[in-house]
């Protein structure tokens, strides 16, 4: 799926020509990010320009980044997965319930939770690929059903006790003062980047998203790839839920809801960066952290709470406008 | 060559994972000192003990008839779920049933659910946390239908279809007075406070503002900033804002929340920012996670008011209306929860049952089960 450019109709197996690495059209958000750091570094050097600030930004956005990464494969295959919030909520509720109520050791609870995520992905795949329901509708529906079912468990109350410290420790242990769950997110990003950029599966996914009929005629198993993408997104959203419990130490059914919109914004805005309209790992991560850096700067300036939403919207418009302006100049 | 490099990368990643999971925890799980309450004024120190009254000791003149249906309107955050569960528990000894009407905290949703509740022709309505200013256009419908409404967790007064409010503005003010005075005394003249409140809920903002006022009234050298936030910021925006404000102002040493429902993620965010030793997290209406955090020393103290207690008070008001008894003025049972005052008591005992024999005191007043 492309955000701002024409569909990529290159045959599968042949890499599309990549834009120049440092052109404005493909790196506008990097410039915006740099400008944000300069501006707030000048305005608040004593608080903004510190290792603590950047470490906090890194930690605070790890789960948002993971949820955004979860969306990349479906979007690459021209699918939507709006059930990731429900999958994350399922993971949070199931994991905490298995550990605290059923008394399972955390490795078993994690495994069962991941299987739960796989099941959600499988259901989405059956409905979207097998029954032919539009993915936007299907996953919107499955996500709503998930939240409703989860709300019925324990009266919607969060699970707050019985979560072993041995589990939270695997997320909260720090390497170079950075919590472990940040590294888990980076590992996921690394694996996804490798698959999307250097494996045939990645090329076929982009081809499917670009022009599924042409890809099918070229021999790509588009249905299988779409199903795989939905499976992976559900599992990665489940992993985000596991990370959430590591970080917070409790679980509530609506844990995933606040991450849905930022995840989509990051995935789509990230598509304007580096890969000329295609969703990509690096663009997504740059988007998450560039926006978070701006929000942090605004918070350190003492701005009211509502300014954050306005900033995110403005950054979205500026970055996409810069990319589109540069692309038009190239075409002209 | 390529396969070997892939194996090497995979091996390094696995080794890193093992190293991370094998490391001993640097910061979590160590109990911190509990709150030092020796400097509290006597009237505030009295709240360290659990209350003994449910807010009234006036029995009904006759046993209420069974078979009534009460519509309960409440929101969809954790403290509201507690209210609904308590309303159900309170209805049971009366032989009544509860019909829930849950709303997202938007004016349209609240008004819509109030209209739906009235249209269901219940014997009474309990609404929690929303002033009549939101659902005023539905009030004539309730009056015309003869449906009595008990408005709780709000700044409403009796009038129109509202037959009782359970708690008065003075009692809500008492929560913030106790909390603010506690902070000022604990801070020893050096308390600098962030006081968070949920903007969609008037009572929440009243507690947040009242706490800030109580701090600055009790301590001339203390400061307090009120921070209104939206319910959608719970778990994400609030923790980020807390950390940013702590980074921006190194003097802040107390962060207060008008409701424990606002604290998810705050302890983790403050810990990750390396600020846990500098700030004390306090508030009102502790929830389950706050109970755990207080025991671990991650949160400091909460002024507890029992959401279940005022749900039972609401059901009591409806029972008085049904039998034709005059309404009573309730007091609000409060307790300051610290690591010491919690001790080895369960969540149920300290968070929800204030006083501990809440669920048996009211049935005695209602003359049921005897």
Image (spheres, coloured by chain):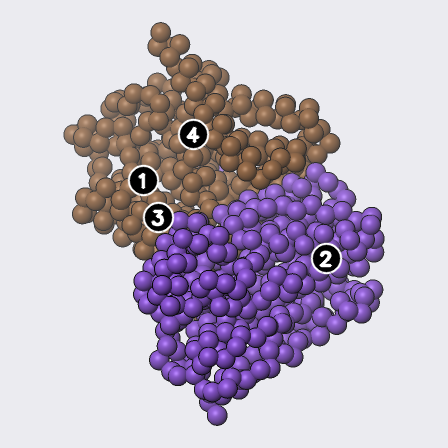
How far separated are the C-alphas under marks 1 and 2? 49 Å
Tag 2: Cα neighbours inside 10 Å, few (<14), some, or many (≥20)? Answer: many
Residue designated by label 2 = B180
Label 2 vs label 4, nearer the camera: 2
Residue under pointer 1: A80
Residue position for label 4? A269
State the residue in front, A112 or B322. B322
Left or right, B2 with respect to A40, comes to left
In screen coordinates, is B369 left or right of B239? left
Q: Position of residue B366 (x, y in %)?
A: 50, 84
* Chain letter matching colour purple: B
In the rendered image, residues at marks 1 and 2 fall on the same chain: no
Residue drawn at x 51%, y 68% as measured from the top left: B164
What residue appears at the point 67 percent right and 41 percent down from the top-left corner? B245
Foreground mark, 3 or 2? 2
Distance from Cα at disc 3 to Cα at disc 2: 43 Å
Give the secondary structure at mark 3.
loop
For mark 4, name the chain: A
> Comparing marks 1 and 2, which lies closer to the viewer?
2
Chain ID at mark 2: B
Q: Which residue is mark 3?
A: A83
């Amino acid at each position: 799926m492309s955000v701002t450019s024409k569909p990529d109709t290159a045959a599968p197996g042949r890499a599309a020509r990549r834009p120049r690495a440092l052109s404005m059209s493909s790196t506008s958000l990097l410039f915006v990010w740099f400008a944000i750091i300069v501006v707030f570094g000048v305005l608040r050097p004593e608080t903004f320009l510190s290792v603590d600030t950047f470490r906090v930004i890194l930690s605070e956005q790890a789960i948002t980044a993971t949820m955004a990464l979860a969306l990349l494969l479906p979007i690459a295959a021209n699918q939507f997965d709006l059930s990731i919030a429900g999958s994350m909520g399922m993971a949070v509720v199931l994991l905490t319930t298995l550990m605290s109520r059923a008394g399972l050791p955390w490795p078993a609870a994690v495994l069962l939770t991941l299987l739960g995520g796989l099941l959600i992905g499988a259901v989405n795949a059956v409905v979207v690929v097998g029954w032919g329901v539009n993915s936007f509708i299907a996953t919107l529906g499955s996500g709503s059903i998930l939240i409703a079912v989860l709300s019925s468990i324990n009266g919607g109350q969060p699970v707050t006790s019985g979560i072993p410290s041995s589990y939270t420790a695997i997320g909260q242990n720090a390497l170079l003062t950075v919590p472990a769950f940040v590294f888990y997110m980076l590992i996921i990003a690394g694996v996804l980047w490798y698959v999307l950029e250097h494996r045939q599966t990645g090329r076929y996914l982009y081809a499917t998203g670009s022009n599924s009929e042409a890809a099918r005629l070229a021999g790509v198993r588009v249905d299988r790839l779409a199903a795989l993408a939905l499976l992976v997104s559900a599992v990665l959203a489940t992993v985000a839920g596991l990370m959430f419990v590591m970080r917070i130490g409790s679980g509530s059914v609506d844990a995933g809801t606040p991450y849905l919109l930022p995840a989509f914004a990051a995935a789509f805005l990230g598509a304007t960066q580096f890969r000329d309209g295609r969703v990509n790992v690096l663009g997504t991560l740059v988007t998450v952290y560039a926006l978070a850096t701006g929000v942090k700067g605004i918070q350190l300036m003492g701005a009211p709470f509502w300014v954050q939403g306005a900033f995110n919207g403005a950054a979205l418009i500026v970055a996409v406008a810069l990319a589109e302006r540069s692309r038009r100049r190239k075409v002209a | 060559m390529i396969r070997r490099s892939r194996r090497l990368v995979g091996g390094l990643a696995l080794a890193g994972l093992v190293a991370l999971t094998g490391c001993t925890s640097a910061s979590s799980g160590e109990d911190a000192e509990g709150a030092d309450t020796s400097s509290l004024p006597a009237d505030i120190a009295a709240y360290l003990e659990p209350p003994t009254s449910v807010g009234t000791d006036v029995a009904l003149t006759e046993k209420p008839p069974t078979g009534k249906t009460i519509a309960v309107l409440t929101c969809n955050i954790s403290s509201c779920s507690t209210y609904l569960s308590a309303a159900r528990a309170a209805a049971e000894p009366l032989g009544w049933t509860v019909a829930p009407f849950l709303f997202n905290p938007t004016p349209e949703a609240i008004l819509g659910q109030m209209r739906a509740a009235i249209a269901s022709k219940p014997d009474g309505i309990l609404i929690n946390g929303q002033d009549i200013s939101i659902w005023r256009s539905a009030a004539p419908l309730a009056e015309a239908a003869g449906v009595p409404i008990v408005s709780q967790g709000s700044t409403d007064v009796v009038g129109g279809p509202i037959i009782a409010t359970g708690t008065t503005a003075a009692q809500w003010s008492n929560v913030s007075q106790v909390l603010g005075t506690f902070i000022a005394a604990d801070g020893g003249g050096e308390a600098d406070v962030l006081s968070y409140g949920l903007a969609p809920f008037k009572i929440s903002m009243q507690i947040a503002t009242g706490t800030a006022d109580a701090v600055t009234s009790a301590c001339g050298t203390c400061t307090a900033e009120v921070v209104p936030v939206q319910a959608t910021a719970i778990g994400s925006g609030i923790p980020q804002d807390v950390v940013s404000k702590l980074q921006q102002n190194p003097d802040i040493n107390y962060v207060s929340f008008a409701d424990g429902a606002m604290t998810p993620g705050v302890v983790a965010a403050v810990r990750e920012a390396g600020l846990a030793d500098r700030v004390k997290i306090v508030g009102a209406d502790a929830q389950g996670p706050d109970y755990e955090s207080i025991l671990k020393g991650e949160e400091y103290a909460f002024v507890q008011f029992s959401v279940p207690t005022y749900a039972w008070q609401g059901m009591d008001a409806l029972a008085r209306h049904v039998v034709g008894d005059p309404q009573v003025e309730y007091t609000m049972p409060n307790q300051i929860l610290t690591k010491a005052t919690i001790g080895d008591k369960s969540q149920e005992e300290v968070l929800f049952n204030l006083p501990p024999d809440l669920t048996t005191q009211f049935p005695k007043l209602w003359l049921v089960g005897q």
